[in-house]
Image: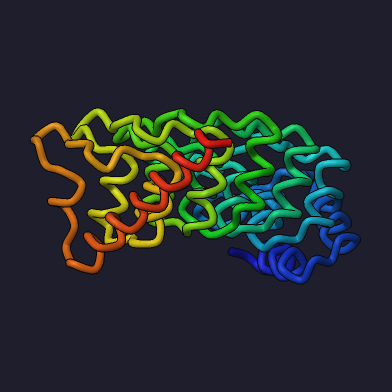
C-alpha cells in the first residue's frame, strides 16, 4: 500500500467517519481498492465492525455489493465473518444481499456466520431472508453443517429453531449435520442436534452410523443422554 492507502486504512480502523469520507472524496472514488486483496473502504469498515462508518459510506454512495479481488467476498461477508452484528444490520438496511455467494467455496453470509458464535448475526440474516438450507458450491454443505463442525451450541440451536433441515445430507459423503458434529468432536453441537430432533440412527453413504463415528465414550454417552432428553420432551409434548 502507498501512504494514502495506509492513511485511509488507519482512519477506517479507528472509525473516523469524517476523515475517511474526506480522504476518499479527495481521491475521487468511494470504492477505491486497497492492497493486493482489492478491498474497498466499506469492506474494511465491515471487517473492523465500524458500523457508523459503514452506514455513512452507504449513504454517501459506496457500492454495497462490490467484491474483493482475492476471494470474491462482499462487505456483508466480512462483517458476518467477524461477528459484527451492528455492521451486519447496517449493511442489510443498505441493501446487501444475504444469499449472495463468495469465497472459493461459494459460501453465503449465513454459512460464514454459522462458523462462529454469534446467534444474533444468524437471526439478523434469517429475518432479512437468508435461505437456511442453501448449499455451498464446493461440497454441498449447509449452514447447519458448518455450525455443527465449527460453530457454537447457541448457533446450532438458533438454526434449529429457525427451521433449518436437521437431517439433510451432503452430496459427497451422505452425512447429516449431526454426523459432521460427531466427526468434528463438537460434543455440545452434537448433543444439541439430537435434542432438537436430528436422527441419531442415521447412517452415511458408506453405512457408518452416528455412534460409530464418535471418537470417545464421552461423546457416545452424551449422544445417548441427549436422545433421552429428546424422547422425554416428545412424550411431554404429546401429553399436553
Figure check: 148 above or below 9: above
Q: Is residue 198 left or right of residue 217?
A: right
Q: Nearer the viewer, residue 137 or 219?
A: 219
Residue at horizontal 64 percent and vertical 50 percent from the top: 121
The quarter of the picture where the N terminus appears is bottom right
How many numbered badges does the structure rendering display? Answer: 0
Q: Is residue 189 left or right of residue 53?
A: left
Quarter assignment of residue 150: bottom left
Quarter assignment of residue 84: bottom right
Figure check: 35 above or below 145: below
Q: Nearer the viewer, residue 214 or 53?
A: 214
Coloring basis for residues: rainbow
Quarter assignment of residue 123: top right
The quarter of the picture where the C terminus appears is top right
Q: Locate residue 190, reporting x and y percent.
A: 35, 53
Q: Locate residue 38, reporting x and y percent.
A: 56, 49
> From this viewpoint, is residue 146 visible?
no
Q: Is residue 44 left or right of residue 200?
A: right
> From this viewpoint, is residue 221 visible?
yes
Q: Locate residue 55, reporting x and y percent.
A: 83, 48
Residue at horizontal 75 percent and vertical 32 percent from the top: 95
Q: Locate residue 166, reporting x and y percent.
A: 40, 36
Amino acid at each position: 500500500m502507498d501512504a494514502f492507502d495506509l492513511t485511509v486504512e488507519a482512519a477506517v480502523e479507528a472509525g473516523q467517519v469524517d476523515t475517511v469520507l474526506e480522504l476518499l472524496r479527495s481521491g475521487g472514488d468511494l470504492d477505491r481498492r486497497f492492497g493486493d486483496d482489492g478491498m474497498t473502504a466499506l469492506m474494511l469498515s465491515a471487517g473492523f465492525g465500524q458500523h457508523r462508518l459503514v452506514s455513512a459510506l452507504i449513504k454517501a454512495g459506496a457500492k454495497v455489493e462490490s467484491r474483493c479481488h482475492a476471494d470474491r467476498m462482499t462487505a456483508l461477508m466480512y462483517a458476518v465473518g467477524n461477528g459484527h452484528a451492528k455492521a451486519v444490520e447496517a449493511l442489510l438496511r443498505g441493501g446487501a444481499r444475504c444469499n449472495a455467494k463468495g469465497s472459493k467455496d461459494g459460501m453465503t453470509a449465513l454459512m460464514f456466520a454459522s462458523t462462529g458464535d454469534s446467534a444474533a448475526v444468524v437471526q439478523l440474516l434469517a429475518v432479512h431472508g437468508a435461505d437456511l438450507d442453501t448449499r455451498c458450491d464446493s461440497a454441498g454443505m449447509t449452514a447447519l453443517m458448518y455450525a455443527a463442525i465449527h460453530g457454537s451450541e447457541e448457533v446450532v440451536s438458533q438454526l434449529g429453531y429457525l427451521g433449518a433441515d436437521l437431517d439433510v445430507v451432503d452430496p459427497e459423503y451422505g452425512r447429516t449435520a449431526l454426523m459432521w458434529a460427531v466427526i468434528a468432536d463438537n460434543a455440545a453441537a452434537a448433543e444439541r442436534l439430537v435434542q432438537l430432533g436430528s436422527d441419531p440412527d442415521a447412517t452415511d453413504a458408506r453405512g457408518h452410523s452416528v455412534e460409530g463415528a464418535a471418537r470417545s465414550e464421552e461423546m457416545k454417552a452424551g449422544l445417548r443422554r441427549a436422545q433421552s432428553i429428546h424422547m422425554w420432551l416428545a412424550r411431554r409434548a404429546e401429553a399436553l
